[in-house]
Image: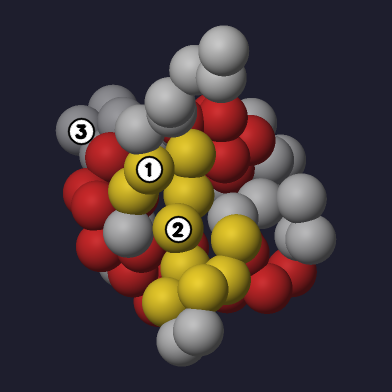
Amino acid sequence: MATAQMTYTTTEAGVELGVTPTRVRQYCIAYDEIGRKHGRDWSLTEADILRIRNLPEFRKKPTTDLEG
């Protein structure tokens, strides 16, 4: 019996990741293993969101202390 996975739109994934839906679509286009396209829309699984979080270019750079 197959287990249903929660799927996200690019807007929902963007909220989870803290980026715009456009940026999520760019990741989907750049990496074949991220997301699935259904017509004009993309759907992403929790695993896809984790893949994006683990991309080297996604990792946020540490902020510098401006007071010091």
Mark 1: few/some/many CA within 10 Å (<14, 14-19, 20+): some
Q: Earlier in the sequence, mark 3 or mark 1?
A: 1
What numbered label is drawn on residue 28?
none
Residue 17 appears anywhere in the view: no
- Say if mark 3 contacts mark 1, CB within 8 Å: no
Q: Nearer the viewer, residue 27 or 6?
A: 6
Residue 2 in the image: state x and y as whole percent: 56, 19
Look at 25% across and 62% down and name the residue there. Answer: 11
Residue 35 appears anywhere in the view: yes
- Say if mark 2 contacts mark 1, CB within 8 Å: yes
Amino acid type of the residue that numbered disc 3 sits on in the rendered structure: Glu
Residue on which the image places disc 2: 43
Residue on which the image places disc 1: 7
Residue 15 in the image: state x and y as whole percent: 22, 49
Residue on which the image places disc 3: 67
Which residue is at the far right?
32
Residue 10 in the image: state x and y as whole percent: 36, 63
Where is the C terminus found, in terms of image quarters? top left
Marks 3/2: CA distance? 42 Å
Q: Earlier in the sequence, mark 3 or mark 2?
A: 2
Dot 2 lies on which element? strand
Where is the N terminus found, in terms of image quarters? top right
Relative to 7, is 68 on the left or the right?
A: left
* In the rendered image, the vertical position of residue 61 relative to residue 11, given as above or below: above
Marks 2/1: CA distance? 6 Å
Look at 47% across and 68% down and name the residue there. Answer: 42
Relative to 53, is 10 on the left or the right?
A: left
Relative to 50, is 16 on the left or the right?
A: left
Amino acid type of the residue that numbered disc 2 sits on in the rendered structure: Ser
Which numbered disc, 3 or 1, marks the residue closer to the eye?
A: 1
